[in-house]
Image (tube, rainbow, N blue to C red):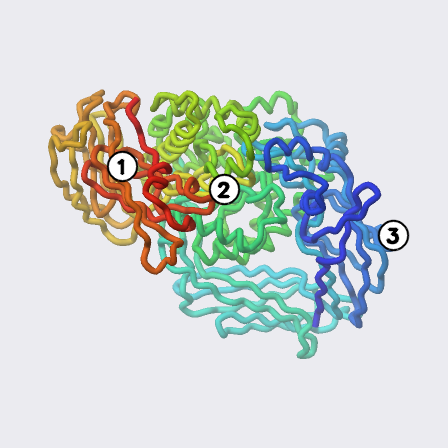
C-alpha cells in the first residue's frame, strides 16, 4: 500500500546570511512576519515597506531523509509559488513556473540537502515578456507573463504583495508496482437512475510493467471492477433512485462517498476517495425575442441565480484555513446566496472551499485564471496553461457544486473596447485559449458541465461581448459615472458583475489604521482605497442623495454604507422583477483580501457591512419591491420559492411625519418561481416630485418603501426614538436585544455593532420604522450594553 510522509516541518528560509524558521504550507511573507523581519503589510502604509520582498530571490532548505522498502519515492509539491528550481544534494531535480499546478519528482533512494530556490516573480515575468513581446493589461504590473495569482500584483481592491513559497502541502509518496495517477468521475442522472463513469489512469513502476491490475469503484453499496494491463481503465456504476443534489433553497445536498481502490492480486496498492452528488446542470443559451438567454438549469429546474463574486480571501493565500473558508461561505449562505463565482484573477481554491460549497448548496462558477489582460499564446506559457487547466479540471470535477467553467474575466470585452486591438497588430492575446484550447479540454475531461468562453460574453463575435441583450453582462458604467437608479435602465440577460463601494467597518479601520485621525482623505484611508478615483465616486454617490458631510467621518462612513446597500438592492430588485428575461445577478463582491474600501459585503476582517444584510433581504425566496414606473410606482411580488405566494399587501400613502393619507390592501398571487407586477392605484401614488409623501408596502413581514425624491430633497423629520436594552435569556451575558421604538419616521436605521465591541455582531441591517413601530436588534459578542451606549452606535437618515 502506498505510504505518505508529510514534509511540513524542519524547513528554513534563507534571509541574507540567516536561516529563519519556515512554515510549510506558507510563503516568504508569513515566515518573515513570524520572524519579525517585516511589519504587517495590511497595517497603515506598510505595504510599501515590504515591496522589496517580491523583487528578491528566496531559498527554502531542509534535509531529506527517508527509509522505505517501496520501489518508488516521489517528492510531491501541491503548489509552488512560482518560478522555482529544486535541487537535492546539489543536483537539480527540476524547475517550475506555475503556481496553479502540482509538481512531482522521482527521489527514489535519494537523500540529502533539499533546496527550493524561488526566483523573483518580476524577473520570471520579464524573461517571458522578452520572449513573447509586450501585451496590454489594465494595471502596470506583469501578471499576464507568469502563471501566478494575478491580484497579488495589486488590483483596484488589493495590495501589491508579490509572494513566493510552498503555498500548498509538500509530501513524499512511497509506492510499488503502481499508483493512482488520476481519477475522473463523470456523474450523470437519467430517468431517476444515477450513473458514475470512473475513468482511471495509473502510473506503473518498472516492476509493475504489464502486470494485470484490478480497479474497484464503490458508491452507495454498488461496486464495479475492471482488470487491465495498460495504464487506463473505465468502471461504470448504476445507482438506482439516488437523492438529487440541489442548490440551496431548491432542495437538499446529499453527498455520496465514491471510493476507488487499485489492487494487485487482491492486495491494495492505492486508494482514492471523494464525495459526489447526483444532479444535472446546463445553461440555456437559447435565442428568444429578447436576445440570447443565459439561464442555469439544475435537475431540469430553471434557476434565477443569486450570486456573489469571490476573490482570494487573503493576499497571502496559504493563511486561509478550511475553517476560514467555511466561515466565509456560511456568510454567503446566510445572505441567501446560491452561486459563488471564483474570479479569474485569483486562484483555483483549496478543496476545502469546494467541499463547503458542496455541503452548503452553493453553486460554483469557476473561472480559468485569466483576467483583464491580453495573454500571450506562445511558449513557455501555452504548455503551462494547458497543463494547469488539465490538472485543475480533474481535481475539481468530482464536486457537485461546480456548475460552470468560464474561460476568462473581461478579456474578450477588453480586446473589443479597451484599445487593445490596434497595439496587438496581429499578436496573440488569449482568444485561442478561450475559444479553442480550454473548451477542448473541458469537452475531453469534463463533458458533464457547460463551458462559456468568458465573462462578459455574448456567445459569439456576432454581438458585442458585453451586449446586455445576449449572454452575460458586466455593469460598471453605473458605479463609475452614474446614479444607482440607472441600474433600472436595462434588463440584461444575466448580470455577472456589478457593485458599489463602501468603507469597511469602523473596528476594522481602527485596527488597520492605528492612531490615525480618520477622515475620508486621511493618509491611511487613501492608501486603503485602491480604486481609480474611488473616493470621488463614493462622494458623488452620497451627494446625489444626501448632503455630503463635512468634518464628520462617522456620518460619512454611515452614508457611504447606506448608499452601497441601496445601490446593490436597486439593481437586484429591478432585475429580479424581470425574471425570466434576467436570469441572475452576481454581486461584485462577497469578500476582501485585506482591510480596504471596496465593493465587498464582508470586509477584510470578516465583519459584515450593511450590504450583507441587504443581500439577505433581496436574495430571499420572497421579495416585495416598489419599483419606479412611467406612471408611478409598480408593486413587484417576486416569488422564487417552489410554493405559490398569495400575498395580502397593505399599501399606505403616508406624509413625511408618518401619518396615513390613504390605505388599502391588495391581494396579489405569484406562482412558484414567478413574479407578479401590479400598478399602484392612482390614489395611493405620491405626487410626482413630492417632498412630503411616500409609499409603504407590507406583506408577510416584508416591507418595501418608495420615496419620489432623493433624501436631501425630502422633508425628513428629525428622527426621534427610544432605546432600551434587554438581556437575552439563556445567553449568559453574550447577547443583548437593542429595542428601538420610533416616534417619527426613522429611515435606514443602522446599529453599528462593532462600536459596542470589536467582535460584536448585529442580526439586522438597515431598517425603516414608522411612528409607533418597534424593532428588536439582537447583538452577540458584546457583553452587557447600556441603552446610552447602544444609542451612540445607532445611525439613521437625518433632515438635509
Q: CA distance from mark 1 to mark 2?
A: 27 Å
658 sits left or right of 498 in the view: left
Q: Outermost residue, bottom direction? A: 266
In three-dimensional space, the C-alpha distance between marks 3 and 2, rounded to whole angstroms, equals 43 Å
The quarter holding residue 157 reads top right
Residue 581 can be seen in this image: no
Query: In this figure, which residue is indicated by the disc labeled 3?
Result: 91
| Residue hosting label 2 | 591
Q: Nearer the viewer, residue 622 or 461?
A: 622
Which of these two is toward me, 748 or 65?
Answer: 748
Q: Could you tell me which secondary element the residue under label 3 belongs to?
A: strand
* Spot occupied by residue 63 in the image (x, y as percentages of width and height): 82, 58
Please, what secondary structure does the residue beneath circle 1 have?
Answer: strand
Which of the pair 358/717 is nearer the observer? Answer: 717
Labels 3, 1: front one: 1
Residue in the image at 41% along x and 27% along y: 556
Instruction: Say which of marks 3 and 2 sits in front.
Output: 2
Vertical placement of residue 141 versus 81, above or below: above
Q: CA distance from mark 3 to mark 1?
A: 70 Å
Q: Which residue is mark 1?
A: 768
For residue 569, which quarter of the picture?
top left
Q: State which tag comes first along the sequence, 3 or 2.
A: 3
Amino acid at each position: 500500500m502506498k505510504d505518505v510522509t508529510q514534509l511540513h516541518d524542519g524547513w528554513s528560509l534563507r534571509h541574507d546570511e540567516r536561516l529563519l524558521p519556515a512554515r510549510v504550507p506558507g510563503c516568504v511573507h508569513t515566515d518573515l512576519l513570524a520572524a519579525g523581519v517585516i511589519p504587517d503589510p495590511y497595517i497603515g502604509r506598510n505595504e510599501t515597506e515590504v515591496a522589496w520582498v517580491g523583487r528578491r530571490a528566496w531559498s527554502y532548505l531542509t534535509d531529506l531523509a527517508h527509509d522505505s522498502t517501496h520501489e518508488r519515492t516521489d517528492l510531491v509539491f501541491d503548489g509552488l509559488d512560482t518560478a522555482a528550481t529544486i535541487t537535492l544534494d546539489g543536483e537539480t531535480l527540476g524547475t517550475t513556473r506555475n503556481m496553479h499546478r502540482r509538481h512531482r519528482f522521482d527521489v527514489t533512494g535519494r537523500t540529502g540537502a533539499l533546496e527550493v530556490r524561488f526566483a523573483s516573480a518580476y524577473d520570471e515575468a520579464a524573461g517571458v515578456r522578452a520572449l513573447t513581446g509586450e501585451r496590454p493589461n489594465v494595471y502596470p504590473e506583469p501578471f499576464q507573463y507568469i502563471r501566478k495569482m494575478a491580484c497579488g500584483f495589486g488590483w483596484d481592491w488589493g495590495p501589491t504583495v508579490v509572494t513566493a513559497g510552498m503555498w500548498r502541502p509538500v509530501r513524499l509518496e512511497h509506492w510499488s508496482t503502481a499508483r493512482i495517477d488520476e481519477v475522473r468521475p463523470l456523474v450523470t442522472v437519467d430517468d431517476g437512475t444515477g450513473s458514475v463513469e470512473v475513468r482511471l489512469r495509473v502510473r506503473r513502476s518498472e516492476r509493475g510493467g504489464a502486470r494485470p491490475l484490478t480497479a474497484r469503484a464503490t458508491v452507495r453499496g454498488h461496486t464495479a471492477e475492471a482488470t487491465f494491463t495498460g495504464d487506463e481503465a473505465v468502471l461504470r456504476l448504476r445507482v438506482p433512485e439516488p437523492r438529487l443534489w440541489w442548490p440551496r433553497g431548491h432542495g437538499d445536498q446529499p453527498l455520496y462517498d465514491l471510493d476507488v481502490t487499485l489492487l494487485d492480486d487482491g492486495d491494495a496498492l492505492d486508494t482514492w476517495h471523494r464525495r459526489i452528488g447526483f444532479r444535472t446542470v446546463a445553461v440555456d443559451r437559447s435565442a428568444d425575442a429578447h436576445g440570447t438567454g443565459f439561464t442555469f438549469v439544475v435537475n431540469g429546474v430553471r434557476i434565477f441565480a443569486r450570486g456573489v463574486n469571490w476573490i482570494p480571501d487573503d493576499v497571502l493565500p496559504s493563511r486561509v484555513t478550511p475553517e476560514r473558508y467555511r466561515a466565509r461561505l456560511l456568510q454567503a449562505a446566510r445572505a441567501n446566496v446560491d452561486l459563488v463565482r471564483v474570479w479569474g484573477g485569483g486562484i483555483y481554491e483549496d478543496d476545502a472551499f469546494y467541499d463547503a460549497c458542496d455541503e452548503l448548496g452553493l453553486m460554483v462558477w469557476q473561472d480559468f485564471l485569466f483576467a483583464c489582460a491580453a495573454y500571450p499564446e506562445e511558449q513557455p506559457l501555452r504548455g503551462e496553461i494547458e497543463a494547469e487547466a488539465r490538472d485543475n479540471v480533474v481535481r475539481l470535477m468530482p464536486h457537485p457544486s461546480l456548475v460552470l467553467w468560464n474561460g476568462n474575466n473581461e478579456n474578450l470585452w477588453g480586446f473589443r473596447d479597451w484599445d487593445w486591438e490596434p497595439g496587438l497588430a496581429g499578436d496573440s492575446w488569449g482568444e485561442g485559449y478561450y475559444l479553442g484550447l480550454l473548451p477542448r479540454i473541458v469537452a475531453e475531461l469534463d463533458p458533464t458541465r457547460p463551458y462559456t468562453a468568458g465573462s462578459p460574453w455574448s456567445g459569439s463575435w456576432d454581438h458585442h461581448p458585453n451586449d446586455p441583450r445576449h449572454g452575460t453582462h458586466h455593469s460598471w458604467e453605473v458605479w463609475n459615472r452614474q446614479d444607482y437608479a440607472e441600474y433600472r435602465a436595462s434588463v440584461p440577460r444575466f448580470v455577472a458583475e456589478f457593485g458599489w463601494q463602501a468603507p469597511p467597518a469602523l473596528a476594522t479601520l481602527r485596527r488597520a489604521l492605528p492612531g490615525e485621525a480618520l477622515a475620508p482623505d486621511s493618509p491611511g484611508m487613501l492608501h486603503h482605497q485602491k480604486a481609480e478615483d474611488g473616493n470621488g465616486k463614493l462622494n458623488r454617490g452620497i451627494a446625489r442623495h444626501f448632503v455630503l458631510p463635512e468634518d464628520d467621518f462617522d456620518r460619512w462612513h454611515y452614508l457611504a454604507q447606506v448608499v452601497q446597500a441601496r445601490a446593490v438592492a436597486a439593481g437586484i430588485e429591478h432585475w429580479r422583477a424581470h425574471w425570466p428575461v434576467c436570469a441572475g445577478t452576481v454581486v461584485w463582491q462577497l469578500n476582501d483580501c485585506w482591510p480596504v474600501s471596496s465593493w465587498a459585503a464582508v470586509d477584510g476582517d470578516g465583519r459584515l457591512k450593511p450590504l450583507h444584510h441587504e443581500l439577505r433581504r433581496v436574495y430571499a425566496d420572497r421579495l416585495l419591491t416598489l419599483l419606479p414606473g412611467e406612471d408611478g410606482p409598480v408593486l413587484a411580488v417576486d416569488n422564487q420559492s417552489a410554493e405559490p405566494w398569495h400575498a395580502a399587501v397593505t399599501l399606505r400613502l403616508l406624509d413625511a411625519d408618518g401619518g396615513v393619507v390613504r390605505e388599502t390592501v391588495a391581494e396579489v398571487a405569484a406562482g412558484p418561481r414567478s413574479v407578479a407586477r401590479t400598478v399602484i392605484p392612482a390614489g395611493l401614488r405620491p405626487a410626482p416630485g413630492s417632498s412630503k409623501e411616500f409609499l409603504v408596502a407590507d406583506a408577510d413581514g416584508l416591507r418595501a418603501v418608495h420615496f419620489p425624491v432623493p433624501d436631501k430633497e425630502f422633508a425628513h423629520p428629525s428622527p426621534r426614538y427610544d432605546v432600551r436594552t434587554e438581556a437575552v435569556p439563556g445567553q449568559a451575558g453574550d447577547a443583548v436585544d437593542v429595542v428601538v421604538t420610533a416616534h417619527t419616521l426613522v429611515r435606514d436605521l443602522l446599529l453599528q455593532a462593532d462600536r459596542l465591541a470589536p467582535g460584536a455582531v448585529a442580526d439586522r441591517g438597515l431598517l425603516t420604522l414608522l411612528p409607533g413601530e418597534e424593532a428588536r436588534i439582537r447583538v452577540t459578542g458584546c457583553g452587557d450594553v447600556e441603552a446610552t451606549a447602544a444609542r451612540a452606535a445607532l445611525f439613521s437618515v437625518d433632515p438635509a
